[in-house]
Image (cartoon, rainbow, N blue to C red):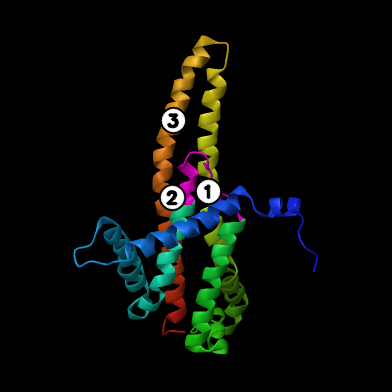
């Protein structure tokens, strides 16, 4: 197998790759430190770690999936934390872009969640029964299957990972562009020779600050939406009507 030269390693390990590994390290280290010496009266770090996991366990896994959802709580908590941290890079100086603003990373996350609910459905109901129940909706005249089955195939087994990935990517990419437009626009106007245009640069910088706070809400909201949709797909795969 040919080895990678130095320049090729440089292309393989980018700023975006560094941010992904940094996010993983931050999450692992934080939870290890928080639970290193757990106390009955939790410290702030322990309280926050327990709150995050409790939210994923009780607010998502149990609430959406039901009593079987507890076993998916670690994955859902990890998913929520990873998306939140990687999204947060979008408003951190010197990073100022989220890895999820590159379509490859949302696609990987979408595929992982997609494989999860497919495997869960097959293990719960069996391969044939699971796909039969999803593709051939019971109780409708057989000629209608020529219309309904392709729709179910596309919506359930093709579009779900696509919509998961595109929703996350589009929101983070749009937020990155908005911040970039107002920040660079303010710099360009400040360097203008026109005094009036220079004055308008203040408005542009203020809008960049406003959009940063708006982006902060989007960061958490998109992590929540992705996690909730994953849980709802798992719940559908486990549903008894299959």
CB contact under 8 Å: marks 1 and 2: yes
Residue drawn at x 29%, y 66% as measured from the top left: 37
Question: Residue at label 3?
Answer: 207
Q: Is residue 167 visible?
A: no
Query: Exactly how many numbered labels are in the figure?
Result: 3
Residue denoted by label 2: 219
- Vertical relation: 136 (above or below) 5: below
Q: Is residue 5 visible?
A: yes
Horizontal side, residue 68 vs residue 103: left or right? left
In percent of width and height, residue 87 lies at 48, 51
Determine whether the residue tagged by mark 3 lies in a helix, strand or loop: helix
Kindly report which numbered mark, 1 or 3, lies closer to the viewer in this rendering. 1
Label 2 packing within 10 angstroms: few (<14), some (14-19), many (20+): many
Nearest to the observer: residue 74 or residue 43: 43
Relative height, residue 28 to residue 208 (above, below): below
Q: Residues within 10 Å of mark 3 (few under 14, many from 20)?
A: some
Q: Nearer the viewer, mark 1 or mark 2?
A: 1
| N-terminal label among 1 and 2 | 1
User: Residue 110: x, y in percent?
Assistant: 55, 64
Residue 219 forms part of the magenta stretch: no
Precedes in sequence: disc 2 or disc 3: 3
Magenta segment range? Answer: 87-103
Q: What residue does disc 1 label?
A: 98
**Horizontal placement of 150 versus 60: left or right?**
right
Helix, strand or loop at mark 1: loop
Q: Quadrant of residue 165?
A: bottom right
For label 2, the SS is: helix
**Could you tell me how far apart the alpha carbons at marks 1 and 3 are, in whole angstroms?**
20 Å
Q: Residue at x 46, y 32 (%)?
A: 208
Which circle's residue, 1 or 3, is located before the other in the chain? 1
């Amino acid at each position: 197998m040919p080895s990678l030269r130095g320049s090729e390693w440089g292309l393989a390990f980018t700023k975006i790759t560094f941010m992904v590994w940094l996010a993983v390290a931050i999450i692992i280290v934080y939870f290890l430190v928080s639970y290193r010496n757990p106390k009955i009266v939790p410290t702030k770090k322990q309280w926050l770690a327990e709150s995050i996991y409790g939210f994923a366990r009780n607010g998502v896994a149990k609430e959406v999936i039901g009593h079987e959802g507890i076993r998916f709580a670690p994955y859902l908590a990890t998913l929520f934390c990873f998306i939140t941290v990687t999204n947060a890079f979008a408003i951190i100086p010197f990073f100022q872009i989220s890895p999820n603003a590159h379509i490859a990373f949302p696609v990987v996350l979408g595929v992982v969640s997609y494989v999860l609910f497919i495997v869960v459905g097959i293990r719960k109901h069996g391969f044939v029964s699971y796909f039969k129940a999803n593709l051939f909706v019971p109780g409708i005249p057989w000629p209608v299957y020529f219309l309904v089955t392709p729709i179910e195939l596309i919506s359930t087994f093709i579009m779900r990972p696509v919509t998961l990935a595109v929703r996350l990517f589009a929101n983070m990419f749009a937020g990155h562009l908005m911040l970039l437009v107002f920040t660079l626009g303010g710099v360009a106007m400040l360097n203008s020779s026109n005094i009036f245009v220079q004055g308008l640069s203040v408005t542009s910088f203020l809008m960049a600050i406003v959009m940063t706070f708006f982006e902060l809400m989007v960061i958490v909201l998109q992590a929540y939406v992705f996690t909730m949709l994953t849980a709802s797909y798992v719940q559908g795969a486990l549903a008894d009507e299959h």
